[in-house]
Structure formats: structure tokens, C-alpha cells
Amino acid sequence: MPEPERRRERPLLSGRVESFADATIDVGPLDRLELAHATAAALVDAGRGDAGPETSRLVALAETVGLDTLSELWRDAPPDSLPGALWALYLLRTWTERQGEAVARMYRAGRAYAPVDEVVAGVADEADPAAVQALADAVLTGAYRGEFDVALERAASFFRVVASGRREMSADEVELADRNERCADALQRAAAAWRDGTLH
């Protein structure tokens, strides 16, 4: 029956990710990096395959297994690698959920200074907390079910608009704005590598 099948699938997916994260505890840096790439590739393959888990489960993975688990797997990977890009997308989703009002405010403040990026990001006109959360969900959904490079480019553009907004709102935000810019640049490189077939 379909319903029990779906119930079994969720713990299986979560359990595999958690076991991979546990495996990083006792391995060296090179093995950790190899594991990061392997898990990221497995998730993307599962999400894009017809027999893979439901996309909604992959989008909500950080909530299911915990952001700390994904951090153990991916945070040390190069930011323009496959695991680095996925880590940025899950961070974006968590950020818009936990601090949606602040993120929306920065986004609105930056729109006038990054009009092209605003169009690429595709946030709804009101750019309220619900709209930025919807963007984060759409980006992760697109990463698994749509065009992966387009999803990365949308996220990159979103980070650029936010960076512009941070700079506009406060001189104290410049360092964080620079981090947002670096994340955007890494996601842009990852998108180009995906198109070239060299993203790992």
C-alpha cells in the first residue's frame, strides 16, 4: 500500500544522512571531504530520480535531521562545490524561516541597488517574510526537481540583493554584506560548473 511505503521512506533517508554525519567524527580532512561530496551527490541523484524521495522531504531535510547534522557533513566543503552549494541553500532556507522579517527587510532595502538580481531571484513583489521563505523553498525544490543551475543562480541573486540591502541599512553590516557577496559568487561559480558537468 502506498501510505506505509511513504512512512518507511522518511526514516530511511534521515537515517542515512545521520549515519554519514556520524561517520565524519573519526575521519581525517580528506575523508571528510570525500564523504561530503558523496552525500551531496547521493541526495541530488535521489531527488532528481523518479524513484527518489518526495521533493518536500528533501527540501525539509534540515528540519528532519537537524542543521547541525548537515553542518557536520558539508560546512568544510569548498563553497563552490556541490556540498558547499547545498549547504548554502539549506542555510538560506533556515535563515528565512528563523529570521524572515529581518531578511525581508534587507532584501527590500537592496532591491533598488541590484535590479537585475532582483529579477533573477524572483521574490514576490511584497518581499515580506512569507515571500522570502517561498523563494528559499522554491530554490531547493528547483535544485532537486528543476534546473539545478537556475536554482543556484536564483539563490546567488538573492544573496546579492540582501548584501546591497545590508550596506544600505547600516555601516555595521558591511562585513556581513561581504559574506553574502562571497556566497553569491560561489553559488554563481557552482551554477557554471553544473552546466559544464564539472560540479562535484
Image: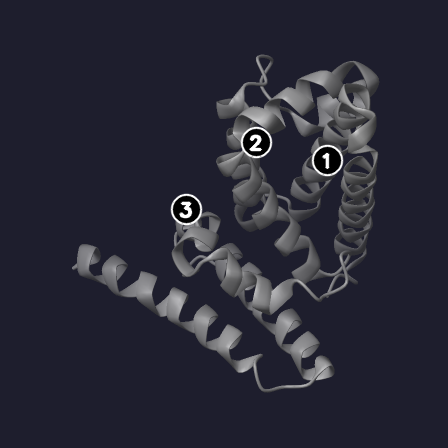
| Residue behind mark 1 | 159
* In this view, 108 is above or below 11: above
Residue receiving disc 3: 56
Q: Measured from the top left, where is residue 3 in percent x and y? A: 19, 55
Please name the amino acid that badge 1 sits on. Phe
Query: Outermost residue, front direction?
Result: 172
Label 2 neighbour load within 10 Å: few <14, some 14-19, many 20+: many
Q: Residue at x 83, y 33 (%)?
A: 174
At x 52% / y 24%, what residue is drawn? Answer: 129
Name the residue that disc number 2 marks: 135
The amino acid type found where label 3 is placed reads Ser
Front position in the image: 179 or 145: 179
**Do we see residue 173 in this rendering?**
yes
Question: Badge 1: few (under 14), some or many (20 or more) residues near its Cα, within 10 Å?
Answer: many
Name which residue type carries label 2: Leu
Which residue is rendered at x = 47% and y = 54% of the image? 62
| 123 is higher (above) or lower (below) than 189 | above
